[in-house]
């Protein structure tokens, strides 16, 4: 099967975002094409979009170079990747890791960064909201199971 990544004709263009959405939908289904129980596909897609944007930010290396800032930024990116992997198997654990990531962003802003102190915290708000939604989704699903 040949999937064109770019075509001049409308309706035949696939880009990275479309492939990411297709991958999210595929990973959230069982082998019999039924949605997995207890997985919020919308939250997973939104987290994937946020992850792609975060990856683009990391690729541009637009963070500082002084002191321990680059190390802390890379450690927080690693923590994000752990949370992203965890959220596919356990929404509760992934939500907690994302909340810890946001706490790390606060640490970075308050104690490490010299300029643009609030930028990381503000850009992390959408992921913190997703973390809360993942935890609430798990909590509701757990309540329905009993």
Image (cartoon, rainbow, N blue to C red):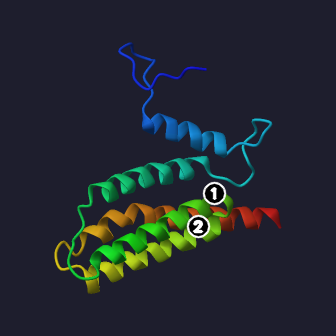
Q: Is residue 13 above or below residue 41?
A: above
Name the residue rendered at 44%, 26% in the picture.
5
Q: Are marks 2 and 1 in contact (CB under 8 Å)?
A: yes
Quadrant the N terminus occupies: top right
Q: Which residue is mark 1?
A: 88
Quadrant the C terminus occupies: bottom right
Task: Answer with mark 2 or mark 1, whichever residue precedes in sequence.
Answer: 1
User: Could you say whether the residue bearing mark 1 is in a helix, strand or loop?
Assistant: helix
Q: Which mark is residue 140?
A: none
Callout 2 crowding tier (Cα within 10 Å): few <14, some 14–19, many ≥20: many
Name the residue rendered at 72%, 61% in the picture.
141
* Left or right: 122 in relation to 26: left
In which quarter of the view is residue 135 placed? Answer: bottom right
Name the residue rendered at 63%, 63% in the picture.
91
x, y percent for residue 110: 27, 84
Q: Residue furthest left?
A: 115
x, y percent for residue 140: 68, 64
Name the residue rendered at 71%, 55% in the picture.
38
User: Quick one: 116 or 35, which is closer to the camera?
Assistant: 116
User: Could you say whether the residue bearing mark 2 is in a helix, strand or loop?
Assistant: helix
Q: How far apart are the alpha carbons under marks 2 and 1? A: 8 Å
Q: Residue furthest right?
A: 146
* Left or right: 27 in relation to 53: right
Callout 1 crowding tier (Cα within 10 Å): few <14, some 14–19, many ≥20: some
x, y percent for residue 7: 39, 18
In which quarter of the view is residue 22 placed? Answer: top right
Q: Which mark is residue 94?
A: 2
């Amino acid at each position: 099967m040949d999937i064109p990544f770019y075509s001049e004709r409308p309706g035949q263009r696939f880009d990275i975002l479309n492939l990411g959405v297709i991958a999210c939908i595929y990973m959230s289904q069982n082998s019999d094409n039924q949605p997995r129980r207890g997985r919020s596909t919308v939250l997973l897609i939104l987290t994937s979009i946020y992850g792609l944007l975060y990856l683009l930010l990391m690729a541009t290396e637009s963070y500082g170079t002084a002191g321990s800032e680059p190390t802390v930024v890379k450690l927080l990116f690693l923590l994000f990747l752990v949370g992203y992997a965890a959220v596919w198997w356990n929404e509760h654990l992934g939500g907690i890791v994302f909340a810890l990531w946001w706490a790390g962003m606060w640490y970075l802003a308050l104690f490490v960064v010299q300029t643009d102190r609030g930028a990381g915290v503000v850009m992390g708000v959408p992921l913190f909201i997703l973390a809360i939604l993942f935890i609430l989704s798990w909590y509701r699903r757990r309540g329905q199971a009993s």
